[in-house]
Amino acid sequence: MKKITLATLIGLVLTGCGGGGGDDSTAPQPPVETKPQLVMGTIDRIDPVNNEITVNGMPYQVNDVEYANKPLADGIALLQPQMMVELTALTKSNVTVSIEPTMVGEITAISPDRSTFIVNGVTLNFPIDTSIELNNWVMVSSLPVVTELGLGYKVLSVIKIEKDDFGNRYELEGRLTNLNEVDQTFKIGASTLVNFSNAANLGDIECGNDRQGIQCLTNADKQWVEVSGEMQGGIFMADEVEIDSDDAEGQEVEIEGIITDINSDKTKFTLNARNQFSINHQTKIEYNDQYVDKSMLAIGSFIEVEALNGVAQEIELDSDDSNVSGFREFEKKGILENITATSFTVNGFKIDIDSQIIIDNNEKLVDLDGFRVEVEGVIIGNRYVAREIERD
């Protein structure tokens, strides 16, 4: 499908309206091809001869390449297919490519069948290339997806790198949980413990575009964060923490990813756990070259969205992989009661438990009997299974 952005349509209107000046030419003027101000997606193809990459099906000529806000001397030579990138489209043929991996670090374990491996304390499922060995440095690109254990990762690529090319820095993205302001720690997901004491002391905790120190983490629970620093003894020692949330206001964007949350009337959704968009009656939704109803959208849908000022103009559902997750998340608040070995209730609603449950402040389930709580979990078949409980 050929996409025409809003800026193109504006150009067509202005061309047709005329201007009243001295130009009396009646010849129609071709519209100027434009691209969104911000593009996020994976690299489909690289053409080093013409210094060009294709992202989300569109070709872009590369002006420069950067990682962690620093230019990379080797530029396009460091790019590889399926890398997650962000493009700032200065002009049609002049873009800045920012490499945006989910993880950068050392592989500390590989399963015998090479289907799983561990980077920065996170176990990932992805068949890695035989050229990648234990203790190699890799760059992992992935998208957030609801799994049986909660919000996890759909790995898109695992690329072997020379750490010197990327600043010798570990990087990790994920959902922030278990914030402890006293110890200055939190977890990413349920696995990696992050110590942010150095980041707090340096003021290098970023909320949006402002560096606000530890106070900005207070309301960041369950948000998607990005940390950089160094792994030490199984703990990620962060020297910089960024609350990675974007409502896409004030710009035209094109982003591919996975819906990680959507409201009941399907007028608002979150893409990749951090990009928030609204849907109105003018939003076009396409699937298999046909326009469809918004009822097709669900948590786990793999989509490409074009939006202006946070409002989705066009959504394209991936025809090959329209839903990459068989799971949804849930949240319940109320009085916890009726505790058994396998379940409890919240305001009479039954919720199952298993070995993956996390209770804040190291409390026991029996300690919460009769108290008001907030429960988050995943829906597995017809079962609502708790993943985290905290006093509300």
Image (cartoon, rainbow, N blue to C red):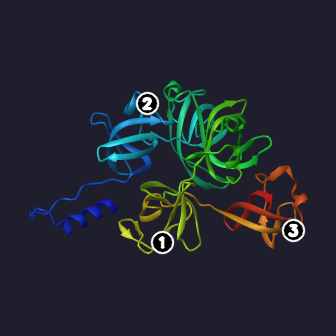
In front of the other: label 2 or label 3? 2
Nearer the observer, 145 or 173:
173
- Judged from the image, the secondary structure of the residue bearing numbered disc 1 is helix
Residue at 54% from the left image edge and 64% from the top image edge? 269
Residue at 85% from the left image edge and 49% from the top image edge? 362
Q: Are marks 1 and 3 in contact (CB under 8 Å)?
A: no
Residue type at numbered disc 1: Lys
Which residue is identified by label 3? 337
Residue type at numbered disc 2: Leu
Name which quarter of the figure residue 32 lies in.
Answer: bottom left
Q: Which mark is first along the chain, 1 or 2?
A: 2
Up-down relation of residue 7 to residue 198 (above or below): below
Give the CA distance from mark 2 to mark 3: 57 Å
Badge 1: residue crowd in 10 Å (few <14, some 14–19, many ≥20): some
Nearer the observer, 48 or 183:
183
Residue type at numbered disc 3: Glu
In-image side of 198 versus 100 (left or right): right
Q: Quadrant of the C terminus?
A: bottom right
In front of the other: label 2 or label 1? 2
Q: Which mark is residue 294?
A: 1
Give the CA distance from mark 2 to mark 1: 41 Å
Give the CA distance from mark 1 to mark 3: 38 Å
The image position of residue 264, as x and y in percent, is 59, 72
The image position of residue 219, as x and y in percent, is 69, 54
